[in-house]
Amino acid sequence: MANIGAIVGGGFGLIRHRPGAVLAWGAIYTGASAALGYGQLRLIGPLDPTIGGEAALDGLSRGVGVQLLFGLASLVVSSVLSAAVFRAVLWPQDRGFASIRLGMDEVRLIGLTLIVYVLGMIAGIVGALGFAFLTTLIGLLFGGSPGVAATFATLVMAGLMGLIVFLLVRLSVVYPLVLVRKRISLDAGWELTRGHFWSLLGAYMLAALAMMVPVAIALFAFAVIIGGSSFSSATFWPLLFQRMAGGDAQMLLQFVAVMAIASLLTGMVLAVSGGTAAAAVKDLLARGEAAPAPDAAALD
């Protein structure tokens, strides 16, 4: 059984021992998100001010190419920062600037994300078709009874949710494992977590529960500042810039507050999520083989 305390402590240990790096990760990610949001506003156009429903995304439909470009840029930033978090846990002696580097590790993480995205899309399409077919078939077999079909659909959805959680936990280490193996390997992550599902699930749940309060506080603050009860990450920054451009002087102060809160929260989320996964890799590898050897390039 994996060491739950060590795994959970891997993420929160970064906040305690490397607060400067955590703030740097958050500031970089937040600054990049804000820059992309401003670029989206300039190139695609203003968003609907209601921040709700399909109307809020009308502006986004007018620049698919730009959105894809921004999405790729966001992926690059998140991959670089994720690699830095993994590196800070796997090789704590790496004391470069926030453990950030640009190299093949980051390229591999980008490639892994694209692979997972494609596989997820395929699985989603196949699952949706299979679910529709089975639900229809059960309804026909039981004389078109809506009650039977609804019960069956509920059971299938519960089973699918359980399967998704199982797969996410078993494959949760594939990203930090890329830095250790120096290659993309889904099966290596699957094998590494064999027999450790429940302990890993417990560690991830504890980490998520510990982050619920700061996340809830930050989301509430964002909703108050932005002037709506709900918003999406795709529209948050463009709308904020749009309101600032409208001549609202108070929005400048609110923007500074948003940047500070978002930087702190994002840094904590990156540290806890990435650090927990990296600590799981470190713990599981130590149980089956030697712990991750120091990255020679990180020590140069």
Image (cartoon, rainbow, N blue to C red):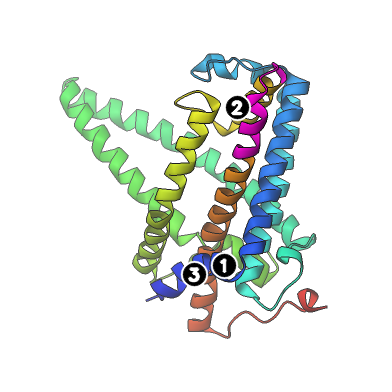
Locate residue 149, reporting x and y percent.
22, 27
Residue 278's disc is: none
Verify whether residue 249 appears in magenta. yes
Q: Is residue 184 visible?
A: no
| Residue at 43% from the left image edge and 70% from the top image edge | 194
Query: Quadrant of the image for the C terminus?
Result: bottom right
* Cα gap from disc 2 to disc 3, whole angstroms: 39 Å
Q: Residue 283: percent from the left, percent from the top?
A: 50, 77
**Mark seen at residue 235:** 2
- Whether residue 130 is visible, yes or no, is yes
Give the magenta range: 245-258
- Cα gap from disc 3 to disc 1, whole angstroms: 27 Å
298 magenta-colored:
no
Q: Residue at x 40, y 73 (%)?
A: 5
Question: Closer to the observer: label 1 or label 2?
Answer: 1
- Amino acid at circle 3: Glu
Q: Which mark is residue 191?
A: 3
- Mark 2 vs mark 3, foreground winner is 2
- Magenta stretch secondary structure, dominant: helix
Q: Is residue 233 above or below residue 48?
A: below
Q: Earlier in the sequence, mark 1 or mark 2?
A: 1
Mark 2 Cα shell of 10 Å, populated few (<14), some (14-19), many (≥20): many
Q: Residue furthest right?
A: 300
Provide the residue designation for mark 1.
14
Instruction: Give the spatial CA distance, label 1 vs label 2.
Output: 30 Å
